[in-house]
Amino acid sequence: MQEDICRSWCGGDPLLEEYHDREWCKIHHDDRFQFEMLCLEGASTGLSWKIILHKRAAYRAAFHDFDIAACAEMPDSELEEILSSESDFCVVRNRSKVYSVRRNARVVKSIQAEFGSFDAYLWNFAGHGQIDGSWLCLSDVPVSNDVSRRMSRDMKRRGMAYVGETITYSFMQSIGIVNDHLAGCRFR
């Protein structure tokens, strides 16, 4: 069944399945949510999405529920406190990834000032419409495309971190710019 194939990357993990069914590739136009997904996708660099998704509540707690203005104003002392947490309920303690949240929040604020919203900036790359893959099998789903390459280049030019073309493609899936549910998946 196509739906089972589409969910196969979830590996039977209930949290991943819930993410697949309710969030992944669904259109989101909220700047705060988009910023959250940008940060979480960046945190997943070199790791599995499963690790980050299971730490999502810790990320929300550590980074003011991804309030862009609050993250942009986080002092070094607060970021260092996040890095020194010994709790099992903590973010991945990678200095450059933790500090990138503040860095990227500052860039997002400048993008909002320039474009009116982070959403307007992001959707402009796709011509303000969803890119629908309509793939038949998971091996057909790309890890990047022309849009993710252009978005990545522009984000880097503006000073963002952890926005390579593969992470940017995953980010576009996470906010629905790209719909890579397989053609027969009922969660399209």
Image (cartoon, grey):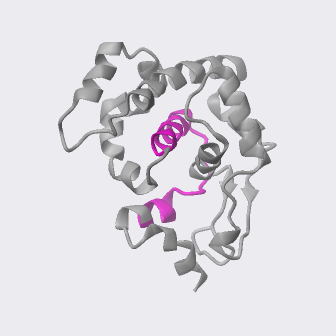
Q: In the displayed image of the protein, which residue is found farthest to the front?
A: 46
Q: List x then y, in percent, for residue 129.
A: 77, 49
- The quadrant in which residue 150 appears is top right
Q: Residue at x 66, y 55 (%)?
A: 143
The magenta segment: 17-44
- The quadrant in which residue 108 appears is top right
156 in relation to 165, above or below: above
Give yes or no for residue 22 being in the magenta stretch.
Answer: yes
Q: List x then y, in percent, for residue 125.
A: 77, 39
Q: Quadrant of the N terminus?
A: bottom right
Most common secondary structure along the magenta stretch: helix
Give yes or no for residue 28 being in the magenta stretch.
Answer: yes
1 in relation to 178, above or below: below
6 in relation to 57, above or below: below
Q: List x then y, in percent, for residue 44.
A: 46, 46
Q: In the displayed structure, does residue 7 sit left or right of residue 182?
A: left
